[in-house]
Amino acid sequence: MKKFVKYILIVLLGVVLIDLVVRAIFTFTYSHVPENAELRQRYKYELNKDTAEVLIIGASRAMFCYKPSILQDSLGMTVYDDGLDGVGVIGQYLSVKNAIDKGGLKVVIYDLGSLQLTYEWNQNKISAYYPYYWKDKNVRELVDDGNPKAKWMLCSSLYQYNSCWHDIVRTFFQKKYHDRGYEELPYTGKEWKPEYWNEKDVAFVPDPWAEKYLDKIVKLCKDNDVKLVITMAPGLGSGFRSSALYLTDYCAKQDVPFWNFTELEELHHDSKYFRDFNHINSEGVKIFTPILAHKLKTYILSE
């Protein structure tokens, strides 16, 4: 019996030591991310320390379709692109919350689509925010709200950093060059036949918890005198109708401007300006962003 108890104690001590070593490794990793490391783009909400007067948020369309330097030249304001592919509204909430906490934020451009308001892109992906649970109070409040039971499990680094080992590679070996958060999709000059994603004229129904965080973004902006504009970047086909119908109704109720560029005449019918039906390439960005900048400048001056 004594041998068994001793064995159990040794195993427990070993697990605790491993847990402490893992925590030390990842604490160092997430606290010493080089400027051009790929990881810096994956955790923009936390690692972007630049203050900006104009913040672009959203998923991949925000990341690839809005060029900060064009907006800066037109508006005379500092701009940062916090868009990130595959991220739902909770990630965009963290970007806005931390940008407001840093100070200086005046305008938020929010490229929003239906996937960002689904369960799959929010509560189902909440573990993506675990690495900064103990470091960022905004992350902690978000995770506690979405998965209250995780709090005690997160005391263990083996749970907190589960499936995060690739982040070490992203930090010290993988580079990602960007223009104030914006990443460029190459222009080939070739036209192609897109496979359209078409939708019926039926408004999208969001996940209630996800929509709650959209409400929080709207309230954050209003409470802090930040102008919020919800947008949809140019696209091909009619795969954006349900999102547009939902956002038209939502924005009207919230008294928030909604600018739908999905069928922008200058781009909508020309596939050579698109990487795929959902994303414009670097040349398409040069056509779209000045149009947005002009509209945004007129809106700001009219207020």
Image (tube, helix red, strand yellow):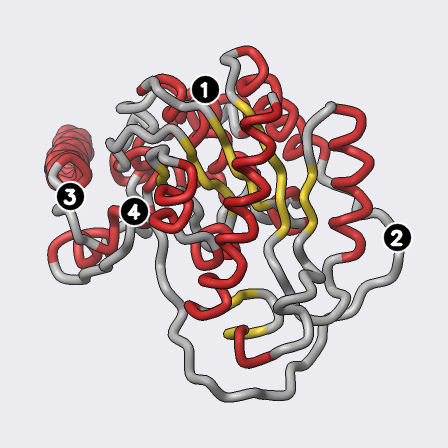
Callout 2 crowding tier (Cα within 10 Å): few <14, some 14–19, many ≥20 = few
Residue 230, image x, y percentages: 62, 38
**Mark 3 / mark 2, whichever is N-terminal:** 3
In this orientation, which residue lies closer to the viewer: 242 or 178? Answer: 178
Residue at the top extreme of this rendering:
223
Could you give the CA–CA distance between mark 3 and mark 2, rounded to whole angstroms?
44 Å
Residue 180 marker:
4
The residue that mark 1 highlights is 141
Marks 4 and 1, how far apart at CA: 28 Å
Disc ID at residue 33: 3
Name the residue nearer the viewer: 60 or 43.
Answer: 60
Vertical relation: 221 (above or below) 173 = above
Q: Are circles 1 and 3 on residues that touch, CB within 8 Å? A: no
Q: Nearer the viewer, residue 114 or 17?
A: 114
Residue at x 33%, y 34% (from the top left corner): 78
Q: Nearer the viewer, residue 59 or 139?
A: 59
Image depth: mark 4 or mark 1 in front: 4
